[in-house]
């Protein structure tokens, strides 16, 4: 469940006319902070980013799922479901939320270090 401040900042961005990806960046920032604080871990910077985007979609940010061919079919379908859930306004079950958090706690925390994020940004810039 995203923090209230994060949702407020994202809504403010949308109200100012900023793009949905900018608003979703607030959720990604929150997720990276959670991994750094040790609230849970991630196996790679990409996973932390994906979790943040998923939270954004579920919180109602109108962030479209990636186009076919950009990511794996499973990722795209999950993003579509998250987007639909966020637009419908339904909540994720607390049991599933707890289970997800417990699984993520077992993952490493170092994946969102400054060095790892820099490496990811350089790799993403090369491929773009």
Image (spheres, rainbow, N blue to C red):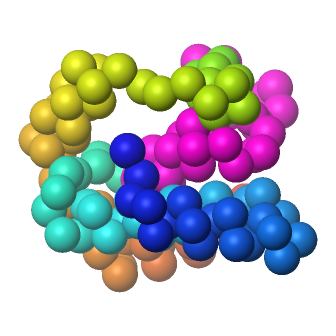
Taking the spot 64% from the left edge, 59% from the top edge, the residue there is: 24
Q: Is residue 111 visible?
A: yes
Residue 23: horizontal and vertical position, in percent? 68, 64
Taking the spot 72% from the left edge, 31% from the top edge, the residue there is: 87
Q: Is residue 80 visible?
A: no
In the rendered image of this protein, does residue 27 appear above or below residue 18?
Answer: above
Q: Quadrant of residue 3?
A: bottom left
In the rendered image of this protein, does residue 109 appear above or below residue 95?
Answer: below
Q: Quadrant of the C terminus?
A: bottom right
Taking the spot 57% from the left edge, 67% from the top edge, the residue there is: 8
Q: Quadrant of residue 106?
A: top left
Q: Quadrant of the N terminus?
A: top left
The magenta region covers: 48-75
Label tally: 0
Is residue 72 inside the magenta stretch? yes
Taking the spot 74% from the left edge, 60% from the top edge, the residue there is: 21
């Amino acid at each position: 469940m995203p923090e209230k401040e994060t949702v407020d900042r994202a809504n403010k961005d949308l109200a100012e006319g900023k793009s949905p990806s900018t608003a979703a960046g607030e959720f990604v920032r929150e997720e990276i902070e959670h991994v750094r604080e040790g609230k849970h871990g991630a196996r790679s910077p990409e996973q932390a980013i994906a979790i943040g985007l998923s939270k954004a979609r579920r919180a109602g940010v109108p962030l479209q799922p990636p186009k076919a061919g950009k990511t794996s079919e499973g990722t795209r379908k999950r993003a579509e479901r998250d987007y639909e859930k966020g637009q419908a306004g339904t909540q994720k079950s607390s049991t599933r939320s707890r289970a997800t958090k417990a699984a993520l706690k077992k993952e490493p925390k170092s994946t969102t270090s400054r060095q790892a994020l820099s490496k990811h940004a350089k790799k993403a810039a090369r491929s773009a």
